[in-house]
């Protein structure tokens, strides 16, 4: 009976692959015909057809040679639905590796990238198939879990979000940190809290810790752990929560978290309030945490959560190929204490402005809805507002921005260095 079931599964797989091949072939023939019609009937230029149909110019040239062509022809030189290089033996290896990763409780990644890493360990003399080929093999075997992605309309780029300035002009290593939404165990009434850290640029890293509460104490404690275990960043990008930003009423204050970062020569960057895309890297990693860790396991107690969270962190580190830098970050003897704020220009009562540490900073109306980067130089006690256009930042406003007297004593030693 087992042999019969296996044969049936194989037949079903072959039928699925044949159906996919026929579907692809049908779409390809329609595309060829559409390109031909655009040229000979609607008189579009070949360049415009290539742009409109998102195909190469050579493809357009090939199928506009004559008003009458055989759109069903197949001159590839190998059977439809069969790969030129990666045969069934390679498919079987991909399947075995995927099943091995899926059955290992210490592994949390089973996609194409994870399979390539494992392939290189098992078969060092045989190069792995390309990521796209592995993805297609997984899809054909019914082993891929495709997620629906939201539409990206490019609003951030259109509104001049200072991405290039932050990640290319300010410094080398930008660490993002954020608290995760509270989680619950069935056997526990108190919610669980977590904090996540992420490096967006290579070498990439994601790291999570369970914390007692979402406050400044937890932020500082876990940041210390991260700095010791991995590396000290040049900048840390954080959300505008009270734990990091400090007072929600007093103007121009220096929070405990800001002081802690500046003492370690790490410059804080505060993301845009209520704009999750401005923390896209850490928000994406938080999504990975939920899908591959929290929603995957039915936890019984806190001990199991902590144990398997370390498994997940180690698996993430292997998956991303992170290695701690051998050379420590150079000592910043010339470090200038600054704080950065990414803000979107608002408009109210016919006035355009941004809000920085409970202070309203007016700006020309031309910048309404655009993003700007405010730089607070604590030594000079001045605020510089930068606007990035075509990858180049430009100062559009300078104003005096005095440190709150109640906060001055907190960083007086830092300012006197």
Image (cartoon, helix red, strand yellow):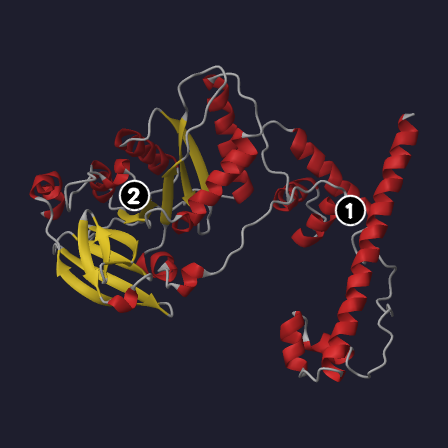
| Image coords of residue 277 (percent x, y) | 42, 50
Marks 1 and 2 close (CB-CB < 8 Å): no
The residue that label 2 is drawn on is 240
Q: Quadrant of residue 249?
A: top left
Q: Determine which quarter of the picture holds residue 293.
A: top right
Q: Position of residue 287 (x, y in %)?
A: 50, 40
The mark closer to the camera, 1 or 2, is 2
Q: Is residue 104 above or below residue 95?
A: above
Label 2 sits on a secondary structure element that is loop
Dividing the picture into quadrants, the one containing residue 223 is top left
Identified at 32% across, 46% down, the residue is 236
Q: Nearer the viewer, residue 135 or 88?
A: 135
Determine if residue 130 is in view. Answer: no
Label 1 secondary element: helix
In the displayed structure image, the side of residue 72 where residue 292 appears, left or right? left
In the picture, which quadrant includes the N terminus?
A: top right
Question: Residue tagged by mark 1?
Answer: 90
Camera-nearest residue between 297 and 94: 297
Q: Is residue 2 visible?
A: yes
Other-residue count near label 2 (Cα within 10 Å), few / some / many at <14 / 14–19 / ≥20:
some
Compared with 261, 18 (above or below) is: below
């Amino acid at each position: 009976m087992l042999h019969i079931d296996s044969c049936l599964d194989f037949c079903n797989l072959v039928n699925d692959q044949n159906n996919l091949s026929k579907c692809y072939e049908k779409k390809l023939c329609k595309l060829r015909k559409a390109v031909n019609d655009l040229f000979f009937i609607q008189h579009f230029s070949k360049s415009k057809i290539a742009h409109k149909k998102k195909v190469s110019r050579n493809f357009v040239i090939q199928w506009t040679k004559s008003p009458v062509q055989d759109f069903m022809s197949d001159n590839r030189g190998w059977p439809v639905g069969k790969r030129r290089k990666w045969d069934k033996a390679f498919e079987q290896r991909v399947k075995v590796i995927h099943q091995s990763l899926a059955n290992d409780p210490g592994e949390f990644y089973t996609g194409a990238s994870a399979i390539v890493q494992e392939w290189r360990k098992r078969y060092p003399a045989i190069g792995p198939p390309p990521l796209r080929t592995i993805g297609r093999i997984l899809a054909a075997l019914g082993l891929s879990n495709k997620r629906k992605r939201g539409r990206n309309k490019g609003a951030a780029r259109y509104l001049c979000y200072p991405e290039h300035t932050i990640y290319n002009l300010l410094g080398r290593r930008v660490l993002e940190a954020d608290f995760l939404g509270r989680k619950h165990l069935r056997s526990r009434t108190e919610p669980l809290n977590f904090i996540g850290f992420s490096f967006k640029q290579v070498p990439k890293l994601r790291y999570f810790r369970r914390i007692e509460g979402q406050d400044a104490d937890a932020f500082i404690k876990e940041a210390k752990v991260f700095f010791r275990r991995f590396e000290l960043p040049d900048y840390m990008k954080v959300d505008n929560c009270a734990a990091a930003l400090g007072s929600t009423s007093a103007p121009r204050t220096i929070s405990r978290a800001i002081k802690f970062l500046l003492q370690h020569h790490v410059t804080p960057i505060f993301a845009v309030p209520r704009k999750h895309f401005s923390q896209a890297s850490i928000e994406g990693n938080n999504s990975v945490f939920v899908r591959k860790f929290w929603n995957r396991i039915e936890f019984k107690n806190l001990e199991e959560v902590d144990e398997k969270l370390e498994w997940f962190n180690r698996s993430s580190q292997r998956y991303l190929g992170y290695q701690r830098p051998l050379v420590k970050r150079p000592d910043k003897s010339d470090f200038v204490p600054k704080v950065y704020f990414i803000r979107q220009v608002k408009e109210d009562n016919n006035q355009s402005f941004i809000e920085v540490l409970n202070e309203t900073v007016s700006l020309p109306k031309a910048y309404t809805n655009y993003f700007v980067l405010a730089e607070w130089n604590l030594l000079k006690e001045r605020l510089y507002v930068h606007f990035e256009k075509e990858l180049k930042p430009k100062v559009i406003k300078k104003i005096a921005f005095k440190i709150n007297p109640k906060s001055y004593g907190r960083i007086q030693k830092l300012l006197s260095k």
